[in-house]
Amino acid sequence: MPIRTVLRMGDPLLLQKAAPIEQFETPELHALIQDMEDTMQHMNGAGIAAPQIGVSLRVVIFGVGANPRYPDAEEVPYTVLINPVLTPLGEEMEEGWEGCLSVPGMPGIVPRYSHLPY
């Protein structure tokens, strides 16, 4: 269960555009996703992106079951996104409190589109 160090806000890697995944079903990609999952669970996170653990690739995972950081949150199924491209289904926005493993202890109000395809 390798736990990776989560980069903090201000790290230059977090400001770079991550590279797309070009080869799927590789041992390296599976290991990366497992490291992300182990790190996210260890930190009681709801999601994490590969750049947050120092890997500049377009991979995101998220999911919420019973989580002490978000005791009132609805459950969200575990999801892996590789090379995601999100196109909003309308202009409606909503705001909600969110935290980030790269900005510990500083939750904030974040605007998000209300409707995205999945």
Image (cartoon, rainbow, N blue to C red):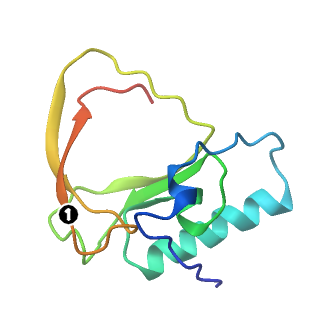
- x and y, in percent, of residue 55 in the image: 66, 61
In the rendered image, residue 17, in percent from the top left (x then y), is placed at 59, 42
Question: Going by the image, does 14 lie left or right of 28?
Answer: left
Note whether 76 is above or below 92 in the view shown: below
In the image, residue 1 lies at what x, y percent?
A: 64, 85
**Count of number-bearing discs:** 1
The residue wearing badge 1 is 107
Please name the amino acid that badge 1 sits on. Pro
Q: Is residue 18 above or below residue 10?
A: above
From the viewer's perspective, is 41 left or right of 74?
right
Quick one: 92 or 57, which is closer to the camera?
Answer: 57
Q: Residue at x 65, y 83 (%)?
A: 2
Using residue 46 as the reference point, say whether residue 118 is left or right of it.
right
Give me the residue at 23% from left, 16% from top.
91
Q: Secondary structure at mark 1?
A: loop
Name the quarter where the C terminus is drawn: top left
For disc 1, the neighbor class at 10 Å (few under 14, some 14 to 19, many from 20) is few
Which of these two is toward me, 58 or 34? 58
Q: Is residue 32 above or below residue 111?
A: below
Compared across the picture, whether 72 is left or right of 64 comes to: left
Residue 78 place in picture, x, y as percent? 47, 56
Residue found at x 20% / y 60%: 73
Task: Determine the image quadrant of residue 82.
Answer: top right
Based on the displayed image, in which of its 4 quarters is residue 33 positioned? bottom right
